[in-house]
Amino acid sequence: MYAKVVGPAAYAGHFIYLQRLTPLGWISVGKYTLGPLSGRILKLPRRCGVTTYHVYLSADQAGGGYLDGWSGTQRVRRRC
């Protein structure tokens, strides 16, 4: 999965979180540092069945005056 943060400022060196949907809500499964072009290739954990993921950027990583944000969801199906 590829994630890129787009905004008026560069986000290189900032952190994003890969989150998985559970019956209790979203839980973080990985923390990644963005590269020089504000993007990152994410390696998804190996899980059997259908899993729903999204990427989350917290407000403190977004910078002053910006709110937190998240991507659209991505469903991944793996056969075991």
Image (cartoon, grey):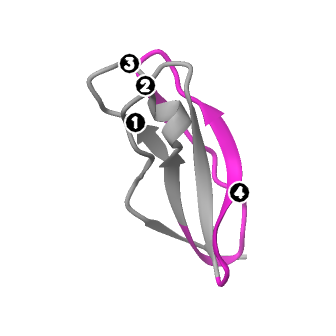
Q: How many numbered marks, from 0 up?
A: 4
Mark 2 neighbour density, 10 Å: few (under 14) some (14–19) many (20 or more):
some
Identify which amino acid the numbered label 3 is placed on. Ala
Disc 4 to disc 1, C-alpha distance: 19 Å
Disc 2 to disc 1, C-alpha distance: 6 Å
Q: Which circle's residue, 3 or 2, is located before the other in the chain?
A: 3
Identify which amino acid the numbered label 1 is placed on. Lys
Q: Name the residue under label 3.
A: 10
Disc 3 to disc 2, C-alpha distance: 6 Å
Identify which amino acid the numbered label 2 is placed on. Ser
Q: Position of residue 69 (x, y in %)?
A: 42, 49
Mark 1 neighbour density, 10 Å: few (under 14) some (14–19) many (20 or more):
some
Q: Which circle's residue, 2 or 1, is located before the other in the chain?
A: 1
Q: Position of residue 39 (x, y in %)?
A: 45, 30
**Circle on res. 47:** none
Q: Name the residue under label 2.
A: 38
Residue lying at 53% horizontally and 32% vertically, measured from the top left? 61
* Label 2 with label 1: CB-CB less than 8 Å: yes
Q: Quadrant of the C terminus?
A: bottom right
Identify which amino acid the numbered label 4 is placed on. Pro
Which of the two discs, 4 and 3, sits closer to the camera?
3
Q: Position of residue 5 (x, y in %)?
A: 39, 35
48 or 24, nearer to the observer: 24
Q: Which circle's residue, 4 or 3, is located before the other in the chain?
A: 3
Which of the two discs, 1 and 3, sits closer to the camera?
3
- The magenta stretch is 23-52
Disc 4 to disc 3, C-alpha distance: 28 Å
* Label 3 with label 2: CB-CB less than 8 Å: yes
Q: Mark 1 points at which residue?
A: 4
Mark 4 neighbour density, 10 Å: few (under 14) some (14–19) many (20 or more):
few
